[in-house]
Image (cartoon, rainbow, N blue to C red):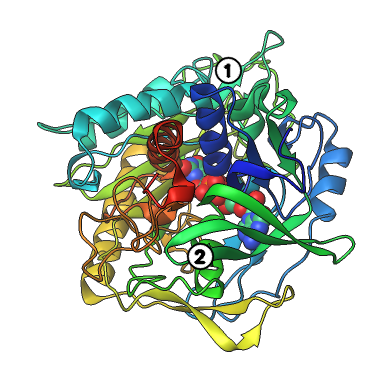
């Protein structure tokens, strides 16, 4: 790119996950002349950079790639090992809190469920029509469809049973989950990673993805960001990059970390941390829904992600959706499996898709006391203030979890034979972390940025990610965060085109 390491770039975007990549893509699409530099601490996990690891066809190669990712802290009491592609933060209050450091961020590992927010999940500080259009753009960028699992046997039966339980007035009907997954000509599933969002972005002359480069500090002159201090993680060499504007999309833990390290500390920074308490259950679909002999010859292609032992999401899986509604505040994600992930009675024959896994995400009450905070007396491996988490479930949260357990138990029973009791996952398991740089309409101490993502008290410093979502939600957040990132990029591109930031105007 013409900016290069020594020149001034127009926008530095920090983080190459779905949001950082979408911001860069929208900026570059809006104005081909903009020089956009994306900084990513991690490395590419394959070719293309930012591709989903499940698309790596060779299982051994996939395992090798995942094994090569840095290992983090051991599981804490009450927690479980980190999901592949992530490392644990190491926070006792949220033992399964995790993050990914690689090109594509968590978006190289995600399950790709992309429901739209609805009712009180929708941030009311964005015009609903504007958000709606941005969600459509986000769906395009992520290649979201409800047809990826059309060939899954038994999905119709599952959706009928769940529809009878949960469909109702003012609710979206039970149906196929919108997923960022496409089906190739060979029938295999192709998972959207940020490489799909990027398209030809990294080949464009004015755009650069710089990997292995950690942003340590935003450089500021008064209320203006003037650039970013970075460290090349291979050589340890530090340098400064000048920029006309900066967007931080470095996840819900490291975005506040970077702001704090840079001395940008709005009162709400790190506060209102939420995630989705997760309740799980499984059921063996009743034989009455399984036409005799109908599935014996099923020979659908298995995805490259099929794992020995069962439980992988493959074309026979089917991913169904029990949508959130304000009067039923759980988001239900229902995945049929090719085999049971748990031992079944001897002699039980399981047909592909007959084991139904149910995951209910609960809406969590917002509280400023649930928060990420940065420890100035301790540093992480990069010398940045260490990430700490204060997080508790309120009485209302506990009640919501109990209600979700009852609901999911009813669903498991209606589907067939429940496989064990519903159980609650340790805090942090949803991998959806929201609120830590939330948006708001006024700089009143309850938000970190305005509805365009611009950090309060700054002229040209923006934040993106699930962390900007201000509402209590239950649905998977990435689609919403990408949509908001698209809007941030549009605001920024328009401002850079019309105003001269160097003269102090707000871009
Ligand atoms: C197994 C799994 C399943 C999931 N399933 C779903 C799902 O079905 N639906 C859904 O909506 N969401 C899901 N998620 C969550 C989803 O992946 C995240 O919401 C999404 O990736 C967030 O995008 P992001 O760009 O904001 O952040 P991230 O994807 O976390 O990317 C942040 C990037 O910033 C980089 N970074 C951080 N600090 C710095 C720094 N100082 N300098 C330079 N780079 C830095 C990181 O290395 C990382 O690459 C899942 C996640 C996982 C791991």
Residue at position x 58%, y 81% from top?
77
- Quarter of the image with the C terminus in it: top left
**Residue 100 seen:** no
Q: Nearer the viewer, residue 197 or 425?
A: 197
Q: How many marks?
A: 2
| Mark 2 to mark 1 CA distance (whole Å) | 66 Å
Pointer 2: what residue? 221
Pointer 1: what residue? 295
Residue at position x 56%, y 56% from top?
226
Residue at position x 53%, y 22% from top?
29
Q: Nearer the viewer, residue 263 or 44?
A: 263
Per the image, label 2 sits on a secondary structure element best described as strand
User: Which percent across, then down, holds residue 394?
Assistant: 26, 75
**Residue 397 seen:** yes
User: Which percent across, then down, holds residue 8?
Assistant: 66, 45
Give the label, 2 or 1, closer to the camera.
2
Above/below status of 449 relative to 266: above
User: Which percent across, then down, holds residue 138?
Assistant: 44, 29
């Amino acid at each position: 790119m013409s900016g290069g390491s020594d020149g001034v770039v127009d926008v530095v975007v920090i983080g190459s996950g779905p949001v950082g990549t979408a911001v860069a893509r929208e900026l570059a699409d809006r104005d081909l002349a903009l020089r956009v530099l994306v900084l990513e601490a991690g490395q590419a996990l394959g070719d293309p950079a930012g591709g989903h690891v499940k698309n790596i066809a060779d299982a051994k190669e996939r395992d090798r790639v995942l094994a090569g990712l840095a290992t983090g802290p051991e599981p804490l009491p009450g927690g479980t090992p980190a999901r592949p592609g992530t490392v644990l933060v190491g926070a006792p209050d949220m033992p399964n809190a995790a993050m990914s450091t690689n090109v594509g961020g968590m978006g190289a590992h995600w399950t790709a469920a992309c429901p739209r927010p609805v009712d009180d999940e929708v941030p009311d500080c964005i015009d609903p029509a504007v958000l709606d259009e941005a969600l459509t753009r986000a769906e395009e960028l992520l290649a979201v469809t409800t047809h990826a699992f059309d060939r899954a046997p038994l999905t119709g039966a599952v959706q009928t049973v769940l529809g009878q339980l949960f469909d109702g007035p003012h609710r979206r009907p039970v149906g196929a989950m919108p997923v960022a997954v496409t089906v190739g000509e060979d029938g295999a599933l192709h998972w959207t990673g940020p490489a799909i969002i990027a398209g030809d972005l990294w080949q464009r002359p004015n755009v650069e993805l710089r990997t292995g480069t950690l942003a340590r500090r935003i450089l500021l002159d008064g209320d203006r960001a003037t650039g970013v201090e970075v460290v090349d993680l291979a050589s340890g060499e530090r340098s400064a990059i000048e920029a006309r504007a900066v967007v931080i999309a470095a996840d819900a833990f490291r975005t506040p970390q970077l702001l704090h390290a840079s001395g940008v500390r709005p009162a709400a920074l790190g506060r209102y941390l939420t995630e989705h308490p997760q309740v799980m259950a499984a059921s063996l679909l009743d034989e009455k829904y399984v036409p005799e002999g109908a599935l014996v010859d099923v020979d659908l292609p298995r995805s490259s992600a099929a794992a020995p032992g069962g439980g992988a999401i493959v074309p026979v899986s089917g991913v169904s959706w029990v949508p959130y509604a304000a009067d039923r505040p759980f988001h239900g994600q229902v995945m049929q499996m090719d085999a049971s992930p748990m031992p079944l009675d001897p002699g039980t024959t399981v047909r592909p898709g007959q084991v139904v896994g149910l995951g209910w995400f609960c809406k969590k009450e917002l509280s400023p006391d649930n928060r990420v905070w940065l420890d100035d007396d301790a540093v992480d491996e990069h010398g940045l203030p260490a990430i700490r988490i204060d997080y508790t479930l309120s009485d209302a949260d506990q009640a919501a979890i109990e209600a979700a357990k009852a609901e999911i138990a009813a669903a498991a029973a209606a589907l067939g034979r429940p496989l064990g009791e519903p159980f609650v996952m340790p805090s942090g398991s949803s991998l959806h972390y929201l609120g830590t740089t939330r948006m708001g309409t006024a700089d009143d101490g309850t938000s970190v940025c305005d509805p365009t993502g611009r950090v309060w008290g700054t002229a040209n410093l923006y934040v993106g990610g699930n962390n900007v979502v201000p509402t209590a939600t239950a649905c998977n957040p990435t689609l919403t965060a990408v949509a908001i990132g698209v809007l941030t990029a549009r605001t920024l591109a328009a401002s850079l085109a019309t105003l001269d930031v160097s003269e102090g105007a707000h871009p």
